[in-house]
Each structure stands twice: as structure tokens, then as C-alpha cells.
Image (tube, rainbow, N blue to C red):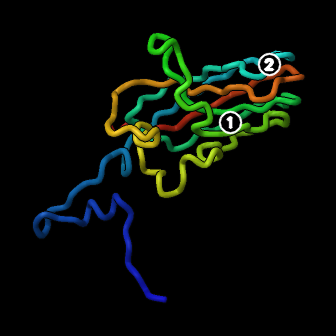
């Protein structure tokens, strides 16, 4: 074993000076960026079936996602993928990645702000600094918006509510 001294991307950028006494600042998407919050609450009816899509809020492709918090009343039998869809005005609102955040998230018992950001396994620890476009495997930021949606993978046999709250860093 060895003693090491390592820094995050933000610290490495700060310390990689072009000249002594000159610091480089990391992207504000990684360090000291402003957090934006969006929330959506949707009523779910007893009988809402598999493949139903619930649209919660819109995010930009260039944003870094800090958290996706799921809350719900007990929706007996229900589960949902939580992911990204195109806006209705682009590609008729087609699915981009249905389980970008969570895959078959259980909604049958009440949730109170459960962070599902990494539940699907797509966003691994080493990718937490990446913006949405890079997580989608794109070469550059297309500068577009996506809807954050839940797609029921198991139908609801009880009525109630689902809420998603997102924390995003826009780089400003």
C-alpha cells in the first residue's frame, strides 16, 4: 500500500496552473454551480396500467444531475422506470432512455424522497460529474431539453400520488 495525494476534477483543474500563482477554475457544473430544482406531482388512479407515462418536468441536456428524489403514497402493485423522453414537439415525445435514472422502481409502498439517481446503474460513481448529454453517450451537447418521466412497469391497483423532485446544476 502507498500513501497518495489525489484531487477531484475540480481540485485538479484549480491546481493545474499555467504559471505560478495563476489558478484554473473548474466548470461551475462541477464546482460552485447553482442548483436548480424542479418538482412535479401527478395523481395516479387505480387501474393506471403498465406503459402509462407520467411527465414530471423538463431538464436541459447540458445540465449535471445532482439528485432525483421520488416520493409517493402507497400505490399497491405499481412500479415504474424513471427516465428521459423527447418533448412532444420533437420526435413526437419519443422515449430517449426510459430507465435512465431508475428501473422498475417499486411504488407499492410509500416513498419519502428516495434518491433514485443511480438506481438503474447507468450513472455510476465515476460518472457523477458528467452532464446529461455525455451520460446519454452523445459526442457533444445538442442543446436540447428532455422530459423526466415515469413509465409504469406494473399497473397501480390503488389510487394515490407520485412526485419527482430533481436537483440540477446548470453551470451558471
Q: Point out the image quarter for the C terminus.
A: top left
**13 vs 101: above or below:** below
Q: Residues within 10 Å of mark 1 (few under 14, many from 20)?
A: many
Left or right: residue 158 compared with residue 166? right
Q: Position of residue 62 (x, y in %)?
A: 37, 35
Please name the residue shown 57% across and 37% down the image: 100
Q: Position of residue 24 (x, y in %)?
A: 21, 57
Residue 122 is marked as: none
Chain-order first, disc 2 or disc 1: 2
Answer whether residue 40 is visible to the viewer in this image.
Answer: yes
Given this view, does label 2 or label 1 mark the residue nearer the observer? 2
Q: Position of residue 21 (x, y in %)?
A: 14, 67
Cα–Cα gap, marks 2 and 1: 19 Å
- Can you identify the residue that label 1 sits on? 70
**63 vs 2: above or below:** above
Name the residue furthest bottom: 1
Residue 49 is marked as: 2
Please name the residue shown 43% across and 41% down the image: 137
Amino acid at each position: 500500500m502507498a500513501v497518495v495525494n489525489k484531487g477531484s476534477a475540480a481540485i485538479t483543474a484549480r491546481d493545474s496552473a499555467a504559471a505560478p500563482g495563476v489558478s484554473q477554475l473548474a466548470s461551475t457544473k462541477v464546482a460552485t454551480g447553482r442548483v436548480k430544482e424542479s418538482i412535479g406531482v401527478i395523481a395516479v388512479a387505480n387501474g393506471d396500467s403498465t406503459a402509462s407515462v407520467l411527465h414530471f418536468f423538463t431538464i436541459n441536456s447540458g445540465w449535471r444531475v445532482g439528485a432525483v428524489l421520488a416520493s409517493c403514497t402507497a400505490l399497491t402493485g405499481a412500479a415504474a422506470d424513471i427516465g428521459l423522453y423527447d418533448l412532444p414537439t420533437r420526435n413526437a415525445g419519443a422515449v430517449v432512455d426510459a430507465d435512465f435514472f431508475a428501473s422498475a422502481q417499486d411504488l407499492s409502498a410509500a416513498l419519502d424522497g428516495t434518491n433514485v439517481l443511480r438506481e438503474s446503474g447507468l450513472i455510476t460513481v465515476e460518472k457523477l460529474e458528467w452532464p446529461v448529454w455525455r451520460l446519454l453517450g452523445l459526442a457533444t451537447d445538442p442543446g436540447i431539453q428532455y422530459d423526466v418521466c415515469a413509465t409504469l412497469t406494473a399497473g397501480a391497483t390503488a389510487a394515490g400520488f407520485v412526485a419527482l423532485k430533481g436537483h440540477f446544476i446548470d453551470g451558471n
